[in-house]
Image (cartoon, grey):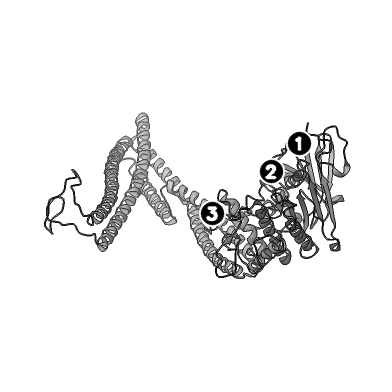
């Protein structure tokens, strides 16, 4: 992945400092000159977090990084203490400038590109689709998350603070999410997340989103239908037919009343309403009594189930206690500690009664446990039926209450108006008939919702079938990808080669490198039959060896990425690889490690830009002809003239 740093411009309170970069840039010299701050400012422009030194705290204003990516130059400016960057790219009419988040996605900022923050912009300008991995490595239903540029940079920027304390977070038990992300980066680089796997995971994620949306919509519609007392199209049609039948019957009564309008025996509407109110009151009373009985039965059944579960636990404890105590030989009373008298063979050693302690029969316990589960399930089913019946009765009570209130209101109105017997009854029945027809029409309108529920259930079933098929294909694709161990073997070979060429003591050509695909935490053992010592980042006691052990792994991964043309940024920035190593006592390590890097730069890693920060300068062999720039840096003494060849990062700063 093309990723070139061309220049870093730092803005201070008293001016700007420009730091150009070549294919190999080497910054070295005394401590306190600002060498490490160069790497930290690069990382800061790429979305990193920093704790500025005292000098940077007092003088730093902003940093601007110039990059060369696959699609052209990119300029990134980030002011001090800002969580946003200003990015510029393109030329002429195609020039663009935009402010976007440095780390946290905040929604798409470039329509149609999926770019939400700086990491996405770098991937987009590099022509690379941001890789996605599952949040959970166990649950297939977990969400997909992106691997950001920050995750890939763990293997491109080896910072001074973590050189000898963390092996790329692969062993970091305190930050589980970092450990999982670090593994995902290695899988991504060595090809364990190939295009087919990524495509199938995206399909599965899309199907999951569709299913969740349909389930959410289905739950809302089902709740509406349940609130009105219907849950299916058949129930709606049955209720509509019943209501229309009642309305038709009332229409017949109205017609009959017209035929008998001249009869003097016609009762007044108040009487019929009073009779209907009385019937409704009686039915409400019956429902209230039924609710009380059902509630009591529900409480009894729940109490019975709780007692049954408690007795089951007590039974298991008693059986366990018997099983334990049956093997105890008592020589003294457990209460008063006096020696027990002799007992017969069939008598209890403590109480003297006939010993009836039997060892629990596992078969009997299994039968009891099965019976308890069956009875519990039966009680749970009864409880569910009781709850459903209570819901039905409560809905019916609400309907009857509303009906009774309506009848009472009409009766009061009829009493006040006191029309003729026929007219008052006729008006009441007409109103009742109109209300029933309106209710029937409203319910009939719910058929559309019921059909939508049925259709959505069918769609959910289809999605689940498709998701199951995609999961099966994804499983096969992952197995095929991980079955090809060629790339992991290549990583092992490159890693051992780097350790040997860096002249790190303790490693031999026939050593065996183990990199389990479950955690990618490398371990090295000797090839001899008697050698069982395991060397890993966790077991190396020397801080200097830890630095080189870690750096060689990053170099090996870059070699694999170069050979596979994997989308790992072509940048290797190592800050103080020799911070725990003496340049006089361990000169061979200096020369071996940097000699390895120079040789790789001339060959396999010719497309990888390298930036080194250390206390001493180790130049490459002249015959390698490497484009390298070195800069020696030294803190400026107070009142001393500035030496341009030894200038610190902040030329005017003297520590005051």
Whole-percent x, y for residue 210 in the image: 57, 56
Whole-percent x, y for residue 185 in the image: 65, 58
Question: Which of these two is toward me, 313 or 506?
Answer: 506
Between the C-alphas of marks 2 and 1, the distance is 17 Å
Q: Residue at x 87, y 44 (%)?
A: 645
SS class, disc 3: helix
**Crowding near the residue tagged with mark 2, few <14, some 14–19, many ≥20 C-alpha atoms within 10 Å:** some
Residue 558 placement: quadrant: bottom right
Give the position of the C terminus as an image quadrant: top right
SS class, disc 1: helix
Of callouts 2 and 1, the N-terminal one: 2
Q: What residue is shown with label 3?
A: 212
Res 103 seen here: yes
Residue 11 placement: quadrant: top right
Of callouts 3 and 2, the N-terminal one: 2
Q: What residue is shown with label 1?
A: 55
The numbered dot on residue 49 is 2
**Crowding near the residue tagged with mark 1, few <14, some 14–19, many ≥20 C-alpha atoms within 10 Å:** some
């Amino acid at each position: 992945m093309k990723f070139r740093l061309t220049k870093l411009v730092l803005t201070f309170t008293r001016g700007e400092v420009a730091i150009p970069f070549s294919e190999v840039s080497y910054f070295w010299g005394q401590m306190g000159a600002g060498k490490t701050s160069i790497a930290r400012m690069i990382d800061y422009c790429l979305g990193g977090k920093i704790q500025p030194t005292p000098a940077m705290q007092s003088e730093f204003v902003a940093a601007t990084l110039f990059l060369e990516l696959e699609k052209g130059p990119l300029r990134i400016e980030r002011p001090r203490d800002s969580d946003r960057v200003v990015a510029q790219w393109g030329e002429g009419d195609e020039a663009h400038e935009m402010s976007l988040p440095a780390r946290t996605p905040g929604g798409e900022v470039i329509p149609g590109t999926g770019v939400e923050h700086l990491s996405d912009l770098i991937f987009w300008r590099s022509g690379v689709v941001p890789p996605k991995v599952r949040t959970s490595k166990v649950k297939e239903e977990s969400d997909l998350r992106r691997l950001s540029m920050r995750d890939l940079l763990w293997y491109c920027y080896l910072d001074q603070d973590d050189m000898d304390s963390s092996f790329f977070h692969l062993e970091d038990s305190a930050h589980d999410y970092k450990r999982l992300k670090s593994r995902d980066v290695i899988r991504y680089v060595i090809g364990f997340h190939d295009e087919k796997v990524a495509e199938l995971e995206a399909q599965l994620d899309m199907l999951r989103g569709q299913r969740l949306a349909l389930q959410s919509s289905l739950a809302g519609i089902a709740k509406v239908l349940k609130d009105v007392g219907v849950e299916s199209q058949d129930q709606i049609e049955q209720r509509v037919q019943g209501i229309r039948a009642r309305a038709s019957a009332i229409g017949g009564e109205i017609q009959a009343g017209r035929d008998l309008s001249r009869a003097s025996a016609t009762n007044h509407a108040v009487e019929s309403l009073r009779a209907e109110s009385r019937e409704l009151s009686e039915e409400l009373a019956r429902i209230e009594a039924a609710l009380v009985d059902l509630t009591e039965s529900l409480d009894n059944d729940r109490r019975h189930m709780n007692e049954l579960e408690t007795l089951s636990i007590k039974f298991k404890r008693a059986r366990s206690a018997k099983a334990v105590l049956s093997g105890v030989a008592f020589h003294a009373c457990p209460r008063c500690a006096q020696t027990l008298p002799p007992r017969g063979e069939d008598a209890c050693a403590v109480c003297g009664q006939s010993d009836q302690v039997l060892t629990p029969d596992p078969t009997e316990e299994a039968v009891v446990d099965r019976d308890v589960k069956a009875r519990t399930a039966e009680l749970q089913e009864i409880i569910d039926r009781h709850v459903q019946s209570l819901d039905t009765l409560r809905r019916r009570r609400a309907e009857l209450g509303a009906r009774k209130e309506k009848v009472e209101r009409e009766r009061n109105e009829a009493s006040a108006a006191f029309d003729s017997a026929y007219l008052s009854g006729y008006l009441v029945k007409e109103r009742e008939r109109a209300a029933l027809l309106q209710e029937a029409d409203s319910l009939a309108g719910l058929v559309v919702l019921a059909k939508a529920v049925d259709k959505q259930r069918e769609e959910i079933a289809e999605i689940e079938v498709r998701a199951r098929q995609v999961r099966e294909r994804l499983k096969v694709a992952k197995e095929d990808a991980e079955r090809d161990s060629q790339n992991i073997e290549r990583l092992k070979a490159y890693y051992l080669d780097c350790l040997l060429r860096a002249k790190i003591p303790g490693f031999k050509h026939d050593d065996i490198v183990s990199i389990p695909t479950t955690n990618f935490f490398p371990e090295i053992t000797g090839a001899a039959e008697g050698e069982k010592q395991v060397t890993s980042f966790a077991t190396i006691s020397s801080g200097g060896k830890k630095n080189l052990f870690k750096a060689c792994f990053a170099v090996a991964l870059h070699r694999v990425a170069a050979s596979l043309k994997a989308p790992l940024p072509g940048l290797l920035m190592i800050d103080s690889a020799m911070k725990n190593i003496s340049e006089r006592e361990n000169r061979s390590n200096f020369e071996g490690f940097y000699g390895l890097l120079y040789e790789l730069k001339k060959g396999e890693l010719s497309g990888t830009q390298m930036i080194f920060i250390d206390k001493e300068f180790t130049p490459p062999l002249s015959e390698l002809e490497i484009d390298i720039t070195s800069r020696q840096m030294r803190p400026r003494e107070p009142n001393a003239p500035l030496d341009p060849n030894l200038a610190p990062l902040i030329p005017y700063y003297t520590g005051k």
